[in-house]
Image: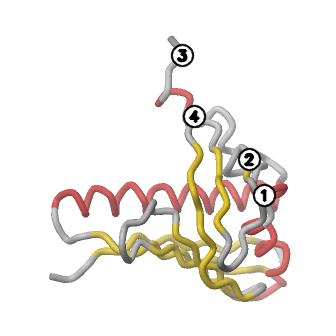
């Protein structure tokens, strides 16, 4: 049975180096995606990301990272073949095209739901990164409060 992948892409009006750093540098990523990180995303290194909405830490293991072109990591908690790949390519006017693929989900009801959530999540990640890099706006702030009401 064919496996499913989550995919999302966007063009960001910033140079490729700036976009790459916004993904691997926690001091940039905490302006649009995470609350904090225990370190920079690097090949072979496991760090922990904390999100504003969740009390837990999420382990993230850098797999293959090629400066300015490719980032891959595993944040599955040990699920086989659950790799996130981010491809960066230069485009016109010194902009960058970012393409994300998260592998792989089973082609069944549960896998379809996971693929849909992850696709939605990566589209949100890209929109938030674009807003931060181009306009210095944090779209994530307050965006998910409705999902975690205070009691």
Q: Where is residue 29 in the image (x, y as percent from the top left)?
A: 75, 57
Find the distance from the CA under tag 1 to the CA under tag 3. Answer: 27 Å
**Element marked by disc 2:** strand
- Please report the residue visible at 75 percent of the width from the left and 45 percent of the height from the top: 138
**Element marked by disc 4:** loop
Q: Give the quadrant of the N terminus.
A: bottom left
Q: How many marks?
A: 4
The residue that label 1 is drawn on is 26
Q: Which of marks 1 and 3 is in front?
A: 1
Q: Is residue 100 above or below residue 76?
A: below
Find the distance from the CA under tag 3 to the CA under tag 2. Answer: 21 Å
Contact, CB < 8 Å: mark 1 with mark 2? yes
Q: Quadrant of residue 105?
A: bottom left
The residue that label 3 is drawn on is 150
The residue that label 4 is drawn on is 55
Q: Position of residue 151 (x, y in %)?
A: 50, 11
The residue that label 2 is drawn on is 36
Q: In this view, does 15 lie above or below 50?
A: below
- Please report the residue visible at 65 percent of the width from the left and 37 percent of the height from the top: 52
């Amino acid at each position: 049975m064919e496996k499913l992948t989550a995919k999302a892409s966007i063009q960001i009006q910033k140079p490729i180096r700036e976009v790459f750093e916004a993904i691997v540098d926690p001091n940039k990523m905490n302006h649009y995606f995470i609350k904090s990180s225990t370190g920079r995303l690097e090949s072979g290194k496991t760090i922990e990301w904390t999100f504003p909405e969740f009390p837990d830490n999420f382990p993230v293991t850098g797999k293959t990272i090629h400066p300015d072109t490719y980032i891959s990591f595993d944040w599955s908690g040990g699920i086989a073949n659950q790799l996130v790949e981010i491809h960066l390519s230069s485009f016109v006017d010194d902009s960058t095209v970012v393409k994300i693929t998260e592998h792989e989900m089973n082609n069944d009801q549960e896998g379809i739901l996971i693929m849909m959530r992850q696709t939605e999540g990566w589209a949100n990640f890209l929109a938030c990164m674009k807003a931060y890099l181009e306009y210095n706006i944090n779209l994530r702030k307050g965006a998910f409060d409705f999902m975690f009401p205070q009691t």
